[in-house]
Image (tube, rainbow, N blue to C red):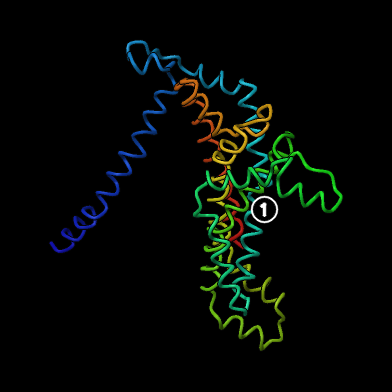
């Protein structure tokens, strides 16, 4: 009798969370999936009788769309360069701050985290001035070094790199906090035993710290990869996908078609292609992690 009451209590506590998950996540996903098989646009939104079932036409059209293909390549560029860069820099900053003896490192912890909680629009305005080819700080400093100015946001390749630099600056803080928490969870006895055996700091780093951080690195790699696959704010605010769609990400492509061109069915199809890509990438990362822990 007592066991049955306890099992009901568990459902009572988890029930509200499951209800919120269903209402705000599962139901919208199911509706979007249905919309992706229709020709729903602004007319269909006003008159549901105008909506027609089109099967897989939206999916066929979207994967054949040259701008969508370009947005996929741009997103891959962001992921391949941005994800390793963010993880490596975040981990390096976390190690420096955690093992730093000076109290100044406590200040650095706050300074590095601030970009993560700063409004992206305000950040974009400041970085827009920094990247300005005429009055920007970066080209001013390059001029002081007698170097030519860089077309930060007007050259197709350089614009992507500029957005990655901005996203890197914003993304360090949160990952740094996760790494610091994981580092401080490593038992001190491991380091004390290593010091008794004569291990130097580099040996302690590669033999103790990094192996003990593998689950934290795995978690950060998963969340960071998903975030970069959904890269939206920086290209939307800084370049609006330009020049010549060279910075258009898949998320920005979906936003344009869904909310600017009102092609809801087409945009929903694009969003499920992105959803499938995220699932595949995440499963691959889980697979690789299992292999890493099976040794």
| Residue at the image position 19 percent from the left and 55 percent from the top | 8
Measuring from the top left, give residue 270's x and y in whole percent: 52, 27
- Quadrant location of residue 91? bottom right
Looking at the image, can residue 68 be seen? Answer: yes
| Residue at the image position 53 percent from the left and 30 percent from the top | 273
Q: Is residue 251 above or below residue 123?
A: above
Q: Is residue 31 above or below residue 177?
A: above
Measuring from the top left, give residue 260's x and y in whole percent: 49, 24
Quadrant of image for the C terminus: bottom right
Looking at the image, can residue 283 be seen? Answer: no
| Residue at the image position 72 percent from the left and 81 percent from the top | 200
| Count of numbered circles on the image | 1
Comparing 206 with 163, the one in front is 163
Which residue does the numbered mark 1 point to in the structure image? 85
The residue carrying pointer 1 sits among few (fewer than 14), some (14 to 19) or many (20 or more) residues within 10 Å by Cα, namely: some
Comparing 122 with 224, the one in front is 122
Q: Is residue 176 above or below residue 201?
A: above
Comparing 288 with 235, the one in front is 235
Q: From this viewpoint, which residue is outermost toward the bottom?
A: 196
| Residue at the image position 72 percent from the left and 75 percent from the top | 202
- Quadrant location of residue 132? top right
Say whether residue 84 is left or right of residue 266.
right
């Amino acid at each position: 009798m007592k066991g049955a009451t306890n099992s009901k209590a568990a459902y009572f506590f988890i029930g509200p969370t499951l209800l919120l998950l269903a209402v705000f996540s599962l139901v919208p996903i199911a509706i979007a999936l249905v919309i992706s098989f229709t020709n729903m646009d602004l007319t269909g939104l006003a008159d549901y009788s105008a909506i027609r079932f089109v099967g897989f036409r939206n999916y066929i059209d979207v994967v054949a769309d040259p701008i969508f293909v370009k947005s996929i390549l741009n997103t891959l560029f962001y992921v391949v360069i941005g994800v390793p860069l963010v993880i490596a820099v975040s981990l390096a900053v976390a190690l420096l701050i955690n093992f730093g003896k000076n109290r100044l490192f406590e200040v650095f912890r706050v300074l590095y985290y601030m970009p993560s909680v700063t409004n992206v629009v305000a950040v974009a305005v400041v970085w827009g001035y920094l990247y300005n080819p005429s009055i920007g700080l970066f080209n001013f400093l390059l001029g002081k070094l007698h170097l030519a100015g860089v077309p930060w946001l007007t050259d197709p390749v350089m614009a992507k790199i500029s957005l990655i630099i901005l996203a890197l600056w914003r993304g360090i803080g949160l990952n740094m906090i996760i790494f610091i928490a994981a580092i401080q969870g490593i038992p001190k006895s491991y380091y004390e035993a290593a010091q008794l055996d004569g291990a130097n700091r580099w040996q302690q780093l590669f033999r103790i710290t990094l192996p003990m951080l593998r689950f934290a690195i795995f978690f950060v790699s998963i969340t960071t990869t998903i975030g970069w696959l959904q890269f939206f704010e920086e290209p939307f605010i800084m370049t609006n996908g330009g020049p010549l769609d060279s910075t258009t990400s898949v998320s920005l492509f979906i936003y344009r078609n869904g909310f600017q061109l009102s092609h809801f069915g087409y945009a929903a199809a694009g969003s499920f292609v992105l959803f499938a890509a995220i699932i595949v990438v995440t499963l691959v990362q889980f697979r690789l992690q299992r292999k890493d822990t099976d040794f």
